[in-house]
Image: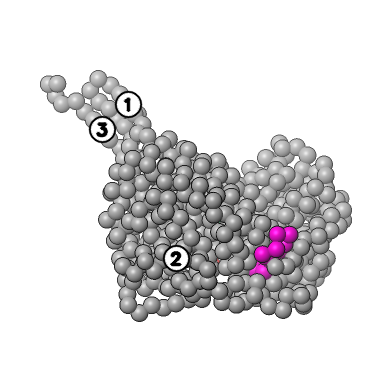
C-alpha cells in the first residue's frame, strides 16, 4: 500500500502469499474525487494460500485458552481507543463519513467488543441434558472453522467487528475481505488485531473488489460465509457458497419505514429524531429511515419541523467537526439518487428542500448530493420502494394505522421499522404485524450490542450481535456417554 504518512504491515504480511505481479487499485477520497492511496488486489491463488494458512492455524487458535483470546480482544479495544483520532481520520478520508460520526463509530465498536467478550463463555460451555447413573447426554459447542468475513464500507468497523470479534473469541480463524471502499480501514483493523496478540494465522486480510469476494465465498472447506452488503451481492454469495453446503449468513439492505401516529406527544421531537435517522452518515446506514408515513392530521406540522431540521444540517467538508452531511461514498450512487429523484418528481412529488442536482455549487469536486425531502410521494415511485442509501427521503400522508401498516408491509425488505406514538402497547401491536428483525418505539436507526441484529425477507439471513450473534459462530455436537456394561 502507498499512503502518505502511514506505515503499513500489509506488504510484510502479504508478500508471503502474493504472486509476483501485483494489480493495484486506487483509494479515492469521495470529498475531492482524488486518489489518496493505492492497494494491492489479491489474486485467486493468494486467497487460497491465505485460506490454507488460516485452516492450518485454526486448531492451535481453538486450543488457545479462552482467557487469552479474551485478553487479546480487550487489548484490541484499548488500541482502538488509543488510536481513535487517526483511525477516524482515515475512515473519513476514504469514505467521506463526517469526522465526528467516524469517531462515534470507532468509539462504539469498543462497546460491541466488550459485550461479545464478556459473554463468550456462555456460548462455549457444554450443557448436560440428561444425567442418570449410566448415561450422560450433553451438548458441546465447537467453532465452525475458518470463516469468511466479507463486508461493506458504510460502517466498516461495526459490520466487520460484528463478525470477526465473535468468530475469533469462539475459536474460529477469519479470512477478512473488507470493502474496496474501506480498505485502508481494513488494513488498520488487521494491524491492530495483530498488535493486540491475534496471531497472523488466526486473522488474515485479503484485499480487492467483488472478484476477490467471489473467490472467498466459493472456497471449499470454509466453516461459514458471513456477508454484509447489498441484496444483489448477497444472492450471488449464497449461490457461490451453495455447492460447498457451507453456512451462509447475510446482512443486507433495507427500506426501513417510520410511522408517526396522530397521538405522538411531540411532533417536533419526532421529526428531529426521524430526520437524524434518515440523514446520519449521509443516509448510508442499512437501518436508515428510508420512508416516512405521517397521519394526515399532523402531516403539515411534521413536514414543517422535518424540513427545518434538514435545512439546519451542515453540509460540507467531512473533516470539519461541525459537518453533519458529507459526500456519498461512491460516485455511482449519485446516479441512483438522481434517478430516484427524477422518477418521483415526474410522478408528482414535491421537493420541500433540495431536489435540484445543481444545489451543491459549493462542492465543485466530490460526490455530493443535496439533502432532499420529498412530499406528495406514493408507492409507484422508486424512492418509496427501492433502497435509496443517500440523503433523499419521501414523506407520505396516511389516513391512520390501517393504511400505515399496509404501506409499511409493502416491501421486499425486512430490516427495521419504527413507530412514533403515545403508547408502547400500540407501537408493539403494529411492530408485531411486520416481518422485520428490529422494531423501535419513538426511536430509530439504532443497533445495540446486546440485541440480535438480523434482517428478514430480502434483508438477510441469520443474526450478529446479542447472544445469537455469538451462537452463530459455534456448532453443537451431541455426546452420549454410556457406562460400560458390568461397571
Ligand atoms: P456490496 O454488496 O456492493 O459489497 C459488499 C462486499 O461484497 C464488498 O466487500 C464487495 O467487494 C463484495 N462483493 C461485491 N460483489 C461481490 C461478488 N459478486 N461476490 C462476492 N463479494 C462481492 O455492498 P456495499 O455497497 O459495500 O454496501 C452497501 C449495502 O450493504 C447496502 O445495501 C446496505 O444496506 C448493506 N448493509 C447492510 C447492513 C446490515 O447489517 N444489514 C449493514 C451495512 C450495510
Crowdedness near tag 1: few (<14), some (14–19) or many (≥20) residues, C-alpha within 10 Å = few
Q: CA distance from mark 3 to mark 2?
A: 50 Å
- Placement of the C terminus among the 4 image quadrants: top left
Residue plotted at (78% across, 48% down): 270
Residue plotted at (28% across, 21% down): 132
Instruction: Identify the image quadrant of residue 263.
Output: top right
Judged left or right of residue 342, residue 1 is left
Residue plotted at (21% across, 28% down): 482
Q: Main secondary structure of the magenta part?
A: loop
Q: CA distance from mark 2 to mark 1?
A: 53 Å
Which residue is label 1 attached to?
Answer: 130
Residue in front for this viewpoint, 248 or 108: 108
Magenta segment range? 318-328
Q: Is residue 242 visible?
A: yes
Q: Which mark is in front, 3 or 2?
A: 2
Which residue is label 3 attached to?
Answer: 480
Q: Is residue 424 magenta?
A: no
In the rendered image, the residue lying farthest to the front is 5
Instruction: Identify the image quadrant of residue 277.
Output: bottom right
Q: Earlier in the sequence, mark 2 or mark 1?
A: 2
Residue plotted at (59% across, 50% down): 107
Q: Earlier in the sequence, mark 1 or mark 3?
A: 1
Which residue is label 2 attached to?
Answer: 8
Is 223 drawn above or below residue 432 in the view shown? below
Q: CA distance from mark 1 to mark 3?
A: 9 Å
For disc 1, does the CB lie below 8 Å from ligand 1? no
Q: Position of residue 181 (x, y in %)?
A: 54, 68
Crowdedness near tag 2: few (<14), some (14–19) or many (≥20) residues, C-alpha within 10 Å = some
Q: Is residue 322 magenta?
A: yes
For disc 3, does the CB lie below 8 Å from ligand 1? no
Q: Earlier in the sequence, mark 3 or mark 2?
A: 2
Amino acid at each position: 500500500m502507498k499512503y502518505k504518512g502511514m506505515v503499513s504491515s500489509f506488504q510484510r504480511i502479504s508478500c508471503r502469499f502474493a504472486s509476483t505481479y501485483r494489480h493495484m487499485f486506487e483509494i479515492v477520497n469521495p470529498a475531492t474525487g482524488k486518489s489518496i492511496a493505492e492497494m494491492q488486489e489479491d489474486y485467486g491463488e493468494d486467497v487460497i494460500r491465505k485460506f490454507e494458512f488460516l485452516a492450518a492455524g485454526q486448531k492451535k487458535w481453538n486450543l488457545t485458552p479462552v482467557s487469552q483470546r479474551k485478553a487479546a480482544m480487550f487489548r484490541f479495544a484499548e488500541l482502538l481507543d488509543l488510536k481513535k483520532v487517526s483511525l477516524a481520520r482515515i475512515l473519513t478520508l476514504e469514505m467521506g463519513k463526517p469526522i465526528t460520526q467516524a469517531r462515534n463509530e470507532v468509539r462504539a465498536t469498543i462497546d460491541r467488543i466488550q459485550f461479545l467478550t464478556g459473554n463468550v463463555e456462555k456460548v462455549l460451555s457444554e450443557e448436560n441434558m440428561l444425567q442418570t447413573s449410566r448415561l450422560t447426554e450433553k451438548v458441546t459447542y465447537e467453532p465452525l472453522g475458518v470463516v469468511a468475513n466479507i463486508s461493506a464500507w458504510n460502517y466498516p468497523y461495526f459490520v466487520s467487528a460484528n463478525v470477526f470479534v465473535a468468530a475469533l473469541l469462539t475459536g474460529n480463524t477469519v479470512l477478512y475481505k473488507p470493502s474496496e471502499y474501506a480498505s485502508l480501514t481494513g488494513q488498520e483493523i488487521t494491524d491492530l488485531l495483530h498488535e493486540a496478540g491475534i496471531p497472523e494465522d488466526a486473522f488474515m486480510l485479503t484485499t480487492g473488489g467483488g472478484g476477490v469476494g467471489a473467490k472467498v465465498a466459493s472456497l471449499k472447506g470454509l466453516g461459514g460465509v458471513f456477508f454484509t452488503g447489498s441484496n444483489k451481492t448477497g444472492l450471488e454469495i449464497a449461490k457461490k457458497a451453495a455447492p460447498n453446503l457451507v453456512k451462509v449468513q447475510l446482512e443486507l439492505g433495507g427500506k426501513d419505514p417510520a410511522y408517526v401516529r396522530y397521538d405522538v406527544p411531540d411532533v417536533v421531537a419526532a421529526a428531529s429524531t426521524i430526520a437524524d435517522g434518515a440523514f446520519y452518515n449521509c443516509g448510508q446506514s442499512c437501518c436508515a429511515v428510508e420512508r416516512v408515513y405521517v397521519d394526515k392530521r399532523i402531516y403539515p406540522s411534521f413536514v414543517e419541523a422535518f424540513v427545518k431540521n434538514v435545512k439546519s444540517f451542515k453540509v460540507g467538508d467531512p473533516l470539519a467537526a461541525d459537518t453533519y452531511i458529507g459526500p456519498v461514498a461512491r460516485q455511482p450512487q449519485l446516479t441512483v439518487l438522481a434517478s430516484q429523484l427524477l422518477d418521483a418528481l415526474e410522478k408528482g412529488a414535491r421537493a420541500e428542500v433540495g431536489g435540484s442536482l445543481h444545489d451543491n455549487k459549493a462542492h465543485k469536486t466530490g460526490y455530493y448530493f443535496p439533502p432532499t425531502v420529498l412530499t406528495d410521494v406514493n408507492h409507484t415511485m422508486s424512492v418509496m420502494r427501492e433502497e435509496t442509501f443517500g440523503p433523499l427521503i419521501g414523506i407520505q400522508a396516511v389516513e391512520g394505522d390501517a393504511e400505515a401498516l399496509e404501506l409499511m408491509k409493502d416491501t421486499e425488505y425486512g430490516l427495521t421499522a419504527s413507530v412514533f406514538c403515545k403508547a408502547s402497547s400500540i407501537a408493539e401491536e403494529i411492530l408485531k404485524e411486520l416481518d422485520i428483525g428490529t422494531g423501535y418505539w419513538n426511536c430509530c436507526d439504532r443497533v445495540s450490542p446486546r440485541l440480535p441484529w438480523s434482517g428478514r425477507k430480502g434483508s438477510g439471513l441469520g443474526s450478529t450481535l446479542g447472544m445469537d450473534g455469538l451462537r452463530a459462530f459455534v456448532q453443537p455436537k451431541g455426546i452420549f456417554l454410556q457406562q460400560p456394561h458390568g461397571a
